Amino acid sequence: MDLSSINIGILTIIGLLGIGFYGLLACRNLIKIVIALQILVKAALLGFVTAANISGKVNLGQSMAITVIVADTVVAVVGMALAIQVRRRMGTLDVKKLSNLRG
Amino acid sequence: MINLVLFFAILTGAIQSIRSKRLIHSAIWLAGVSAMLSIFFFKMGANQVAVIELSVGAGLVTVLFIFAIGVAGEEAITARPIIPRVLTLGLVTIFLVLLVWFIFPPSTTVSLTPEPSLSTVLWEERGLDVLAQIVLIFAGVLGLLGLLAEAKPPLDQPMAQEFIVKRQEGLAELVRESDQSAPGSHLPEEPERLGEHDSVKEVSYP
Amino acid sequence: MASYLIILTICLPWIGGLIVWWVGDKHPRTQHTLASVFAVLAGITSIGLTFYSSDEALIQISMGSIFGKFTLIPDGLGVFLAAIATVVGSLAVIFSINYMQDEEQLGRYYALILLFIGAMAGLGLSGSLLFMFFFWEITAFCSYALISFHNDDPKAVAGGIKALIVTQFGGIGLLAGALISYATLGSYQINDLLTRAQSLPSGVLALIAFGFLAAAIAKSAQVPLHTWLPDAMEAPTPVTALIHAATMVNAGVYLLARFYPAFEGVPGWKTSVVIVGMLSALLAAIMALVATDLKRVLAYSTISQLGYMVYAIGVGAVFASQFHLLSHAVFKALLFLSAGAVIHAVGTRNMYSMGGLSLKMPFVRTVFIIGSLALAGLPIANGFFSKELILEDGLLHGPTWAYWCMLIGAGITALYTARMISLVFYHQPAQLEPSHDAPTAMRVSLALLSTGTFTTWLLAGPFSQILNETLPLHELRHLQTFEMALEILKSPETWLALLVILIGISTWRFQGSFQAILRTLRPISNFAKEGLGFDWVNAQIVKGIQSAATAFRYTQTGILSWNVLGILGGLVILFIILAWGA
């Protein structure tokens, strides 16, 4: 296996996906969960750029990546606002304490 | 060689971001990941996206995170994770192995047709995407304003007294007029009264 | 011309339903009149349609490439089912003018009945499997809504839900068969399935065949999915007469008759159909013998007669089964409506509280006896001709053991019919006084139906001609009416059957001499009163599902991490399936 950008790119995507999902599953702090989501989105971005590199249509991939950056920023903003409000109203950011269902 | 360094840097940054105890440190590590990623983008030939990712990911989002962490405050959650660590690690490993099995090795097909420039592609071919992004930003701003709004306290001042008196006088005049024009007819219903109230108002302001 | 008639037959009741509902419950007389007018108009158009029957798809609505074309074909079977639905429907609506006189929410009632009539006509006329499924589900919904019409009565609501759930099992069978046929043949059209059935691999064809058989069993209340019909008797009586005696339960028999040429080659299919029909006929007759509720007896009798029709299809006598369908629709509606008149006058459904009504309600007694003549299969009434035709064809083409069981079933039918008449009208002394004999609107329906009972067998000739012309795949002979009548009267099986029926009736008359035998049969009768164990099985299934659902509540923790685990787990399973497939 050669160390070209494409191969390394794919390995990075897979690695970031794994780390992001692990963060989603294991973290109890709400803000850490938003950070894990951000890592997942960065993996998606890298996926677009790698695919653009493979197929040769760099500009198409770039325009899609720009779209994803915009959407992901909005998600981060709204997620942070939610976290702030949760902290104000419920007093805690712990995911376990925030659930109201009793099964 | 550079690729390998970048690979390890990105993954280390991400792992540290998840693992660190303090939230501010996580945010800074995330900025680092963004920076490394932007170099990688540049190496792959996506120049504009690299610049945008650097400024937005390492700049805007990091500042936002630090601000939010400052407002929300650090909370030390020292309890154990909810799902047993074995289960988490096992599932994630299976997932990664499956992904590697599916995606590796990639096919290398390069299209030979020359591509139009980025601005042409962005504005002409994917114009709808740009429109959707604008709507998304707008919606995000509105959502943010709504989410961060403080609860309004109830009105502590009643309506001004003179306004109430003026309205009552107007209504009494209306009743007198309708009795004169059509004797014995019943009073008009609520909506009509409001409409005629406006026309009476116009008369009283010469 | 025919296409306009088709559209009118389906849409007139629907438009009528909308208008009656829109008129509002403050004008009940307008509602009664409008409903009857629309129902009668639909009946007239569908009778007119019988003269224009053909086997080409006259109406085709294209629904895109995924759903194919929704077609409506006025062939013999379809026109016939539509005519029965609309004509018996209009008579039931006329009967409701008096029966539902003091009820509230008439708009909902009439709208649902008219919606049902239109959907039933559409079910028969439909030429596309998906279109048929659409109408099938509308009839199931209307049946549920009408059974639980008195939705403040928990028994009615429970009966409605039970009917809905059991018939939906059948609906799954129909949908599965339709989808499999689409996947293998590429088309939803019924005629395509009929002509190209032999080209399908035998496993696939068997799946479709048994799926449709399950749908027919559930919809026509055959054993083992028959438990919903006796509990559906909580519905107002005109609803029972229309839906659960004359039309909706016929949809299953219609399904089997329509697809008979496609499935007759499937190994074991015909035998299963014969067994199902035979079991239903016998077991339901036994249960009818011990029931105390008048409408329940008639419900079990419906199951039993439908068993005869299903048995007839199993031995290959499609015409005989459809002919008995026609007779049964008429005389069962007559029986249910007159039972409704009795219940309306007396106020109870328990037969042991009635008695001696023969003097107080002479008109109802007469029509009830006419209906019972047809049910028992005595000559001149239409039930005689159709039942004899079934038994004759059963002996010729089917297994002999089945024939003997059906013959015994005919005897038991006569027995419980005699019991029913005697307990309601003649058994002395009278315990409850009836408040009135049948009022006018009820009498109109009842009189029309009783004339029908004596005359519908005359339609056998033209009916078989229409079937012969428009259904080439079914290979039905064309019979003149009198030819058929003579054939029946001359054959020895008829005399054997008449003998068994007379034995049945006299067993009731002279039951005093049989007391010793009756005492030994008592444990069986107690078991039969419990529904022969089928209701117990139902209750166990319901209990099992509820406990499983309660156990599943533990997965709803509400904690984010577990939900994400679920998402990731699902993704991993998806990947594993994909990897396996590759």
Image (cartoon, coloured by chain):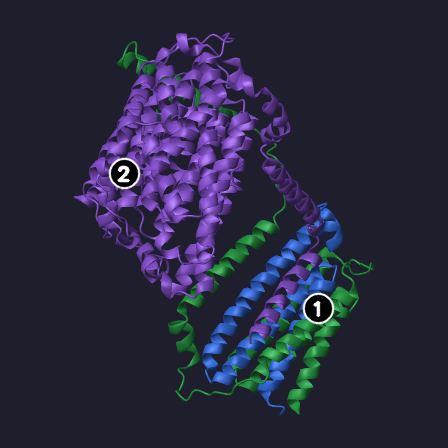
Chain colours: A blue, B green, C purple
Q: Residues within 10 Å of mark 2 (few under 14, many from 20)?
A: few
Residue drawn at point x = 60 percent, y = 86 percent:
A7
Image-based side of C366 in relation to C212, left or right:
left
Circle 2: residue type: Glu
- Secondary structure, mark 1, is helix
Which of the 4 image quarters holds residue C38?
top left
Q: How far apart are the two marked residues, 2 and 1, measured between alpha carbons?
A: 76 Å
The residue where tag 2 is placed is: C487
The residue where tag 1 is placed is: B91
Which of the 4 image quarters holds residue B144?
bottom right
Point out the image quarter for the C terminus of chain C: bottom right
Q: Position of residue C463 (x, y in %)?
A: 24, 40
Point out the image quarter for the N terminus of chain C: top left
State whether discs 2 and 1 lie on one chain.
Answer: no
Q: Position of residue C578 (x, y in %)?
A: 57, 71
| Disc 1 chain ID | B
Q: Nearer the viewer, residue C397 or B147?
A: C397
Is residue C171 in view?
no
Q: Nearer the viewer, residue C74 or A82?
A: C74
Which of the 4 image quarters holds residue B1?
bottom right
Q: Residue furthest left?
A: C1
- Circle nearer the viewer, 2 or 1: 2
Is residue C265 in view?
yes
Residue drawn at point x = 42 percent, y = 43 percent:
C310
Q: Position of residue A72 (x, y in %)?
A: 57, 66
Image-based side of A13 in relation to C250, left or right:
right
Q: Position of residue C415 (x, y in %)?
A: 47, 25
Residue drawn at point x = 59 percent, y = 25 percent:
C517
| Disc 2 chain ID | C
